[in-house]
Image (spheres, coloured by chain):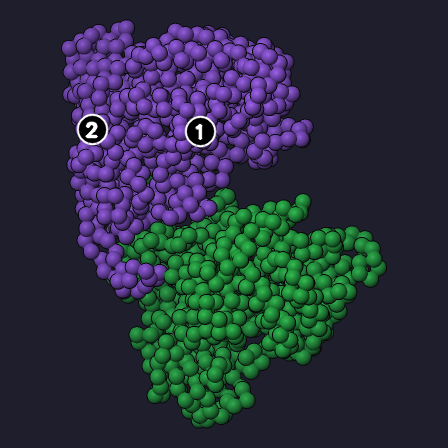
Chain colours: A purple, B green
Amino acid sequence: MIKSFKHSDGFLARQARLVCDTVVPYQEKVINDMVEGCAPSHAVANFKNAAYLNKNGVMPENGEFFGFVFQDSDVAKWIEAAAYSLAIKSDKELEKRIDAICDIIAEAQESDGYLDTFFTLKRPTEKFKNLLEGHELYCAGHMMEAAVALCDVTGNDKLLRIMQKNANMLHRIFVVEGREGYPGHPEIELALMRLWRATGDDKYKELAEHFINIRGVDGEFYVKEAEKRDWKIWGNNPKNLKYQQSYAPVREQRDATGHAVRAAYLYTAMADIAAVTKDEKLTEACHALFESIISRRMYITGGIGSSRIGEAFSVDHDLPNDTAYCETCASIALIFFAAKMLKLKRDGKFADVMERALFNTVSAGVELDGTKFFYANPLEVIPGASGVAPVYIHARPQRPGWFGCACCPPNAARLFASSANYIWDVEDGVLYSNIFAAGELELDNVCISVETEYPFGDTVKYTVKKGSAKLGIHIPEFTSKDFSVSAEGKLLDGYYYVDVREGDVITVKLDMSPRINRANVRVAANSGKAAITVGPVVYCAEGADNHGEVFGFTLNGSKAPEIKKETIDEIGGFSDAARDLGEVYTVTVQGTQLIPNDPNSLYFVDEYSVKKRKIKLIPYFMWGNRGLNEMRVWLPVK
Amino acid sequence: MIKSFKHSDGFLARQARLVCDTVVPYQEKVINDMVEGCAPSHAVANFKNAAYLNKNGVMPENGEFFGFVFQDSDVAKWIEAAAYSLAIKSDKELEKRIDAICDIIAEAQESDGYLDTFFTLKRPTEKFKNLLEGHELYCAGHMMEAAVALCDVTGNDKLLRIMQKNANMLHRIFVVEGREGYPGHPEIELALMRLWRATGDDKYKELAEHFINIRGVDGEFYVKEAEKRDWKIWGNNPKNLKYQQSYAPVREQRDATGHAVRAAYLYTAMADIAAVTKDEKLTEACHALFESIISRRMYITGGIGSSRIGEAFSVDHDLPNDTAYCETCASIALIFFAAKMLKLKRDGKFADVMERALFNTVSAGVELDGTKFFYANPLEVIPGASGVAPVYIHARPQRPGWFGCACCPPNAARLFASSANYIWDVEDGVLYSNIFAAGELELDNVCISVETEYPFGDTVKYTVKKGSAKLGIHIPEFTSKDFSVSAEGKLLDGYYYVDVREGDVITVKLDMSPRINRANVRVAANSGKAAITVGPVVYCAEGADNHGEVFGFTLNGSKAPEIKKETIDEIGGFSDAARDLGEVYTVTVQGTQLIPNDPNSLYFVDEYSVKKRKIKLIPYFMWGNRGLNEMRVWLPVK
């Protein structure tokens, strides 16, 4: 949908603009090692070095591979984000620079189609011999996605041809020649499905299905692979089958386990393939895995992967707030998974999850100014401990400019730049509005403009400017008990179906009253606590709005919270770069503050007073933009 | 005091009996590899193998060293515990068996006095070359403590002579010959002070002071040491100066850092030396370090070391309940430190800390039946996560029979068997009653019997059966606002001073009403929560007493909790072996339970009811004796 939808205004439009104007240019500089104060990325340099080696047969001076084994994917994700940005805002110079990078990539590709600068430069004789840790299939997958996006938006098929050559080689090796093994970090499976759709070449779908079908069938594969080599990259334990989602054939998997990004990328491909092949067992597994996430292993912010150890899913209901991992990439992957689940079953709960992840964890992953990024997204920040003490070392309280392991920043960029693909969908002749966003959609048969301030407004107005359509409007779960649509229609599984034609104006009214959420009592971290949401947006209390203190507060659960529309200037403390955010809802709740007689006393009885006070909350995605301070999503509630 | 005091009844008497009757015999079997189902300890076998090697010049068949590098200390701590047990209950057979082990140790000692089976058997050319990780000084220290205890209780000086020979060698190497370096795991410093007192040989005090004085002066010592060797044991980072308490000369240290057991052993020796030498800077450092623990880094249970990573102190106010490390040994070390602080300043706050650690974490470290032990002592147990999910892997929800790393079980045994040393103290002509415990104390000049059910009774009766004394009775902080003593006296810094003589009966009445404790608001894990204490005992809610569920409970903070005396049969669910515990206070508090309409819903608004209910609490040290269930010390409070 990306080329068919033009954002007009509102939060997602702003994020898309931010990506075009700031994030993509900033990240272009980063991958080219042109940002001072950032650890060099070397991502483009690695491709140049591989190109030099290919051409000259010798390494360039100082031409070693630098960075993580998956450094190539930073370039791929940037190209993909940049390509999407061109659909939003054309930029001929940027197109040329992308094309120039594609030329370097072409030169870095080996003659048989192989493409991975880590192995080309560092371990040329060890290709595909460490699938557990090697990430060469992961990097290839990301480059395939970039290729598809670039061709789709600009028509430039240079990268597409490079990656077809690469995919052809992979198909030959893994399918035709029958090499054992499957990707340690799933990603290529979903990418191959995109490549298949973009090219129509069934080999790619066949390879994707192959990787899915053999995964976990020989659960010992990685153990045997590890026995055959005398080197390692991370030191991953090949016997940790849950970690690498190979504890059972995928059709028999029921619990989301292991590295959260890998898991959700894998499940995305599974759902995609299941929708295409109508594979019942695969469909059943996808539903069970999705349910295991959203019913037992997901934060209210749409964050997944609660454990720093392995960046992984933990056990059911283990959702600590301060040590939460909640990698930005994992929530992006969850959006992908949910989007594919909608293809298996058109049920609003999948769109609800997309919103939850998008408006909270993924949005929080990017500083409002577009140049700083979170990798982990905790739901509670303890100044002095978060990002400092060993068990919180990942849970940084402020966004750094870039990471050595920089998977998240360009991933967020490509997601926001392509949000149209999640806002809208077409299936079986129905035009689905999954997420409310202002703008104009122009398809062959219909043109619809949408006016809304969502998620900071309670009205959505669809105006049909041309043509006709059967429209399926997602009615989010939060408003499912109280909403209205100005046209006769039918509600089914969270979607309101209505036939529209030129001239129709349909107004949807939502219940945006603030909600006091409780968590399952088995979530020990949240017992006795509540979290406030308004629509899909989760709120947090930050010291900056509360005289510097949050941890002494208790919400009064019997008083209705109040919402107000405020600009960042009215809220106060944000940088100028965030001003275009416009108005957002802020929340004020009644509560109390515990004030000890002696603030230095560690434990005390009676020696304190409890004062009434108003607690101010802001959208979670806005936290951490005003310096180090206490932050909390789940507050004690009375 | 150990030989002068005879326990009669009550909790500490019961624990002392348990050590004599069950713990010492059980642990004797363990260190001799005679307990089925326990991983073999090899601790005694290592000494036999070293003895064989010394005698024959060759290794015995299958004679390798097994276990941790500090395995020798398990034997040492067992000897020390067994020696104390002989003061409580004589046992000629046990004395003989201890003597036989001393003979093996004598044979395992090398001709120059060196004693450490790991180095003798495994790395004979690397002695004292890895002080960072090697633990040979730590093991020597524990054996010195055992030697002193054994000689003190039984008069058997065999081990004392062995360890004097060892200490003489150490003094020669480190003081006379000036070898660089100080212990990676402090312990020997406090042991050398005991050896000095037992023998009067000033060399030992000099060596203790030497290790204290040079620590942290050359902060880079471990880095340089590591550069000189090509092998490692644990892989400790020599640059982590805070971890090894060498970030500054000890007199300049102000924050308790690093491995909690090492830290508290070090501080114990510092306080001991400071009291002897009247070193003002050392005294000042000890007070600051103690304050940093009790004001910012200690659990309400007297647990210290909140971080699993490094078994270490974290940052100020970082005291998570579910991931708490709170090693049993660390709280024992804290008792040692507090006892020495009393020698620097007779202030009841030090005795309060001894009680806090003794009646809570240390007592919880031992199963009521005396044959199972905790290493970590969390304040919250989440079934399915605790002891299972990676970040909780250390926080086992049930006590195992032994550990590969078995420092805690014999440490708890020696502490309970020697509790008389902490209950009573004599200094500057004053007889100090630090901890209330029933029994009879007989010194040269006075004989006093004490009747009390403390900590499960509110009355303490001192009867002077013979002689006279100036008595200093510790009035615990919890009762400092409401207590009475039946005799005229003077209260100063938490001690009530009274002169007594034959025939006097002094009755102390305590306020044992349950207290609702709050924590500093900077302790994020406890905000909105409260913990109940009765006297020095911390209480917890366990599923076993509450229909299996705890996490849905909220305390009603405005209703006074009720206490009741109950036997374990009345409480229910405990094994027969715990029956001799007698009556303890249980607590019932008014509260509410959150009951979701759908128990499987992860997040919900309104769809729940809140029911009034009574919440039953038991002493924290009794938790985990009735199978896997939810446990929580800090409960949400309204």
Cα separation, mark 2 vs mark 1, equals 29 Å
Q: Nearer the viewer, residue B402 or B179?
A: B179
| Residue A220 in view of the camera | no
Quadrant in the picture for residue A300 = top left
Q: Residue B24, image x and y in percent? A: 62, 68
- Residue occupying image coordinates x 51% and y 45%: B388
- Residue occupying image coordinates x 64% and y 75%: B201
Q: Residue A520, image x and y in percent? A: 35, 43
- Residue occupying image coordinates x 37% and y 68%: B534
Quadrant in the picture for residue B479 = bottom left
**Residue B338 vertical placement versus B604 (above, below):** below
**Residue B483 vertical placement versus A292 (above, below):** below
Number of the label disc, if any, that sits on residue A582: 2
The residue indicated by pointer 1 is: A406
| Residue A464 in view of the camera | yes
Callout 1: helix, strand or loop? loop
The subunit carrying tag 2 is A
Tell me which amino acid carries mark 2.
Answer: Gly
Callout 2: helix, strand or loop? loop
